[in-house]
Image (spheres, rainbow, N blue to C red):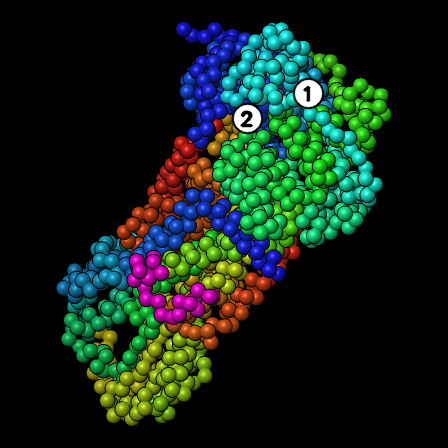
Amino acid sequence: MSAPPSEIRVEGVRHAYNGRDVLHDISLTLPAGQTIAFVGPDGVGKSTLLGLIAGVRHLQTGSIHTLGVDISNKAEREAFLSRLAFMPQGLGKNLYPTLSVRENIDFFGRLFALDAPTRANRITHLLDSTGLAPFPNRPAGQLSGGMKQKVSLCCSLVHDPDLLILDEPTTGVDPLSRRQFWALVDQMRAERPSMTVIVSTAYMDEAERFSWLVAMNDGRILASAPTADVKKQTGTTSVEDAYTSMLPEADQKEISDFTIPPYEDDGSPPVIDAENLTRQFGSFKAVDNVSFRIKRGEIFGFLGSNGCGKSTTMKMLTGLLDITSGTATLFGRRVTPGDMSTRMRIGYMSQGFSLYEELTVRQNLMLQAELFRLPVAEAKQRVDTMLQSFKLNEEADSRPTGLPLGFRQRLQLAAACINTPDILILDEPTSGVDPAARDMFWKHLVALSRDQHVTIFVSTHFMNEAARCDRISLMDKGKVLAMGTPDEITQEAHAATLEDAFISFLEHAGNTVNAASTPQRAPANAGPARTIPSYIRWFSRCWAFARREAVELTRDRLRLMFAILGPTILLLISAYSVSFDINTIRYTVADYDHTHASRELVEQFRGSHYFHETAFSPDRETVETRIRQGQVALGLDIPDGFGRDLAAGRNPAVGVVIDGAMPFLSANVRAYVDAVLLTYAASMQKTLPPSATASLTPVSIVPRFVYNQEFRSIYAMTPGTIMLALILIPTMLTALGVVREKEIGSIMNLYASPASSGQYLIGKQLPYVALAIIAYLVLVALSVTVLGVPLKGSFIGLTIGAVLYILACTGLGLLISTFVSSQVAAIFGTAIICLIMSANFSGLLYPISTLTGVTYYLSETFPASWFQLICLGSFTKGLGIKSFLSMYAALAGFAATYMLGARLFLKKQDS
Amino acid sequence: MLRWVLNVGLLCRKEFYSLMRDFVLLGLIVFSFSVAIVLVAHGVKIDVSNATVAFIDEDHSALSRQLRSVVLPPYFKPPTLTDRANGKAGMDNGTYNFVIDIPPRFEADSLAGRTPAIQELIDATAMTQAGLGAVYLQQIFLGEVQAQLHSPDLNKLMPFHGESRIRFNPNSESAWFTSVMQVVTNATVLSIVLVGAAVIREREHGTIEHLLVLPVSASQIAVGKILANGAVIFVASLLSLWLTVHVWLGVPIAGSPLLFAGCLVLYLFSVTSLGMMLATIAPNMPQFGLLVVPVYAVAYLLSGAATPVESMPDLVQSLVRFFPTTQFVKISQSILYRGAGLESIWPSLLAIVFSSTLFLAMALLRFRSMLARQD
């Protein structure tokens, strides 16, 4: 029934993305304690299968038992994750670029709940054995591709896993680093022979060193057997030949050798001419004094590892980057940024995929063609030709997302060739493309070069591709190490192959194969890590995430600054400027009466500090016009005969015209006008019968403004703005947290770690809570000292509320972040929801008690309204903890609900 | 020049394709221009409305009961009867905006002409309700006491009377004001976020870099983005104004829709340029998110859509003359409510044009250096 614990058994596994099958009914059994290589071109399902075996990808159909663990069983799988190390595809993809080498490894150690001495021991040991010991404090983002992969490997091995899965660990790495990497894996295995190692690779020669071989093609297994047996069965001597012989015949034909006609120099002047090119970023020289000349129709190769300056050089040639010093000319013209006529003749393909994922293949090509100024009909024809010749016809109307890498790269090349350029600049065009597709790619290049005399400048890290170039240039750390035809370079280094030659040049330049000799066994590896109580382990994992997030945050000065400055600016501006205090109602008078009485009336308005007089209007029409144009908010129309009628006791009317565009203003204006008129009437008491005076006020009504005796807006707005700032900024801080990790790919660390998504979310939340609390303290200090708004109530009571409120707001941000699919939507959603809710339905401008219906319930189910009560209560009403208990409970409830919601939305497996 | 226009057109088309694919974003846009507007329009009352009143009645007379019965909607919610302790607690937690304290022997004293005093406690932190609400309550009580005591009507005793006419919104309906202002606010937030985030996304995906190797200039990319996103927001805002505000909420629109549309175009050009400028300052998405918050929040608070510009300090009033959002709120109020024409809005329009030129120039200036930055 149950699988023997020492096996990996895959049965009847199928997998599909967006309705596209990537794995068809796979069944195989792999032995434990061996080294196993998965080979096959890109897009055949290697990564998917590895992800399924590791349990980081959701199993759709079939069953998998990995080392005796049923992967479809959630509890078993999660317990198993602490025995697993999974290194995802992509250079340093599981690393955090701003963290140093040591911090990265330390983070993984904490994630697997190793105690401090164990971590320190293991890190020292791993750094020593990988030759990384000299740079423990260098940020991972500044390492070369090879070094990144070594750090990734250290991170994977820090917890002594039983199963190590490496997904294409050496793609994009220079040959020297590649050799070092495999030496390292061998060494690690020697230290821990029971460890099973599974690797996928597109380099067939690398598979030779593995004891077991799994060959895959098109979502199916071609062979799964000991490597030696596979070669024997197929009667071949190398894995590459063995693989080729297993392919269906149609596919085999594709990979027939092709020859490159020799390059003929027609003696024309060089098309690309670079002299002493240098590019500096701060103190770092990315390209250092590089010179080369490329002739018409020549294929010139740039060979070097990631980060050696190839891309920077190419970008300078295209005018994308400014040249620090030196000159570059294309077609005899100096490269200048805005030179359109040169750009018309260049085709460029950047390293990553740089076409639009949202556009279909055809739409992408059409856009490209039309931007190259082809008329629509011609562009259509050209696009059809390109679809044909790059075999993209079937995919013409699908989007690049989800297409295998090989297709995407072909599409990019098609786009670069669409204008029949004279120069093609290709930055690692075949990176991640399988051998068959690479050959097809090169056939295109050769045809372009030899038949159409297109000059091709191509960068690569594949040796066999470099060998196909007419001339190559070896680069390392921004410098050219050697230049010439592949044969010349091989001879110069007295090497047998180009690869050996490259390695020898690299070694001359000061790189060593392996810094460490046989390292000492670290004592910590002698036994398993001490067992730690589970509740401490639970918190230590939260702490691992929190610590990492905090370190990243402290290195991002700009974000820290915005997080503190943003609320400060908001508070100062709104406290100083936002006000309901009405004191300058501009008015105009149309006086048809011109008597003493009318002048007296106007004098009353003049005397009131609420009103501000503007020029008199000659007639009623002018009054109306000036109100229409927004010049005045109030018009007085004193009719002819007003004074006469007043004297005669005929109760004349005064016209009062009010601008009602803003209802709050118009209602106030009306009330003030009534008051002024009443005062004027009172000043004419002599005209009233004495008995009436008493009966005018049979009772007195004594208004008392409480909490804000002076009735000034600043006392009400300041606490409100603290509420506003603390929801707008902290929510935005966490809103991008998860969705960004998903877009970048570092979320994989969560999938492959024994930590739960709850621990991950809490860990992500804590640093931002701390930051927001600092912002809160700054706001309170500013309110009391600078703005002079006294805190009448309990500071502790306010602070407890603020902490709970911040927990709720950051929780809301995380909830939004797990829910949306893009960063843009996260920002917009957060902005709109928080602004509408907090400005309208939280008591900032309009008291909650006045809300009715749906909006009342909306406001009650949003944390801002509750914190507004705490803020107003403690600042203006002098209240303390006891009055806030129900609000605390509500805020705590929101915080918990949002986190639970986020926990539900965040899956712990890839789809 | 023709080429420039053609390229901008091509890039616009591409932007439309991209936007149409982001369903979550489209959903959010539709929501924020329809349901969100209605919620705010129905929910928010910016003058005295639904204010809560509590009575502490120590008189228990016919007159004190009568006073309670005249506190009526829509200004006030039906009043509650309470005691001193609960009245205080209710004001503390924001349940009561006003507490009216009627002393013992109130009726007897007023009949005897001893002018008893009613105490009116006003929660002065509820700025929109407190001042006016207090005045309304005073008028209501005074009028009622006079009526009950059969004293002569105050108005009849006045030697003259005022005839108030409130123009443009005679019944002071909050919804007329809040709905339109919310459309403007949402359009502002959307403009800043959408364009800025689109630029940063293209930068993070390397697609902008690719475009700049083609015979396409930075100005074409920038203007293409501004026009395409601006057009979507333009259509959304106008539809919202017509369908949500005018048809659904029944708010009359006084001025020329064409003039308003023209001003909206200029305004959106300005705020989308602002979004693009902010995107060239912030290196990545999280930083952009934080940078835009104070920008749109301050723009909103100072716009005049929340509180009157006239109430701001003089310094701020002269500063906001150059704020496109404040000027556009002014223009919207002038055209939509007052039916004003070009002759009264041109200074605001000029300020908007000035600000858009400034933002766009700064965005273009920083565009290339933004791409060169290594991070």
Question: Are there few (<14), some (14-19), or many (20+) residues within 10 Å of tag 1?
Answer: many
Per the rendered image, the range of residues in magenta is: B242-263
A601 w.r.t. B200: above or below:
below
Looking at the image, which residue is at 77% across and 50% down? A333
Which residue carries the number 2 mark? A43
Looking at the image, which residue is at 64% across and 31% down? A441
Q: Nearer the viewer, mark 1 or mark 2?
A: 2
Looking at the image, which residue is at 60% across and 60% down? B2
Left or right, A265 with reference to A344 = right
Mark 1 vs mark 2, CA separation in Å? 24 Å
Which residue carries the number 1 mark? A181
Q: Secondary structure at mark 1?
A: helix
User: Between A61 and A65, which is closer to the camera in this rendering?
Assistant: A61
A199 w.r.t. A658: above or below:
above
Question: Are there few (<14), some (14-19), or many (20+) residues within 10 Å of tag 2?
Answer: many
Left or right, B39 with reference to A439 = left
User: Between A548 and A868, which is closer to the camera in this rendering?
Assistant: A548
In the image, what residue type sits under mark 1? Phe
Q: Chain of mark 1?
A: A
